[in-house]
Image (cartoon, grey):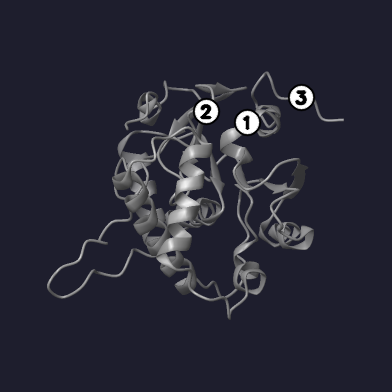
Amino acid sequence: MASSRDHRTDTPHAGTAALICIPSAGNGHFQFDRWPDAVGPWCVVRTPAAGGPGGGAQGTDSTATGPPAPPTLPERAAELVAGLVRRGVERFAVFGHESAALLGYQVAVELDRRGAPAPLRLFVSGCPAPHRLHRSAGEAQTEPTDDELTARVLATTVATGGNPMPSVVATGVRALRADLATLRAYRIPRPTPLRCPLTAIRWLDQGIAPEALASWSAYGDTEVVQLPGSRLSYATEPADLLRVIADRAPAGDPRRPAER
């Protein structure tokens, strides 16, 4: 079922600060449907899910030689940045939850590599900092079964108001499987300090240790905000999160609170 709010993938008006919302793998393209078109000074711009409207990862269809490896996070970030450049999006912040938070970080790294202006702010939600990722998840963690991934996608689809058709759930499972492979291969040699401020969101019922979120401070000017809720609250009950985002206006915006 197509989202009724796909228009938010459009380019924002000139001079408007955009909030680039990156979908999380397996959570469907409807995960931002309960967000308004604007959050404070930010115009909500949702990027397409990896692989298209269904949220499936590219390159996961079987062929005679087997499916190609999923793109790495730096490769996906380079594609996302190229898309923003083509659309003329210049003043923007980035929001990502779970693995999409890591992709948001890589977007900031890619912009720095290109010598392009940094994002106005990076919002990272429900995810340890990159150098803490495998330590937090556990290197010996077993591979989830298809039944386990199906149950997760089905529960997520229902919770976020999607239509749990078999094709939708199957696409979500493929996306999650590819995402897990990408995360297993993701390593950074050391934290790369960013040129933008970061806001790290810790959901109190998600089960991520406070120090795992606080470790984002190694990447620059970072604040950690703790909010009530679990791993899907950013999509199902986003009011508290939206207030946090609305209060972080871009520098120079007249709606930005005065420094105390």
Q: Secondary structure at mark 2?
A: loop
Residue ID for mark 1: 250
When asked about the image quadrant of residue 86, the answer is: top left
Is disc 2 in contact with disc 1, using a CB cutoff of under 8 Å?
yes
Q: CA distance from mark 2 to mark 1?
A: 8 Å
Residue ID for mark 3: 257
Q: Secondary structure at mark 3?
A: loop
Query: Furthest residue to the right?
Result: 260
Residue 46, disc: none
In the rendered picture of this protein, how many numbered marks are placed on residues? 3
Residue 197 in view in this figure: yes
Amino acid on which disc 2 is placed:
Ala
| 232 left or right of 248 in image | left
Disc 1 residue crowd, few under 14, some 14–19, many 20+, Cα 10 Å? some
Residue ID for mark 2: 17
Amino acid on which disc 1 is placed:
Pro
- Front residue of this view, candidates 98 and 101: 98
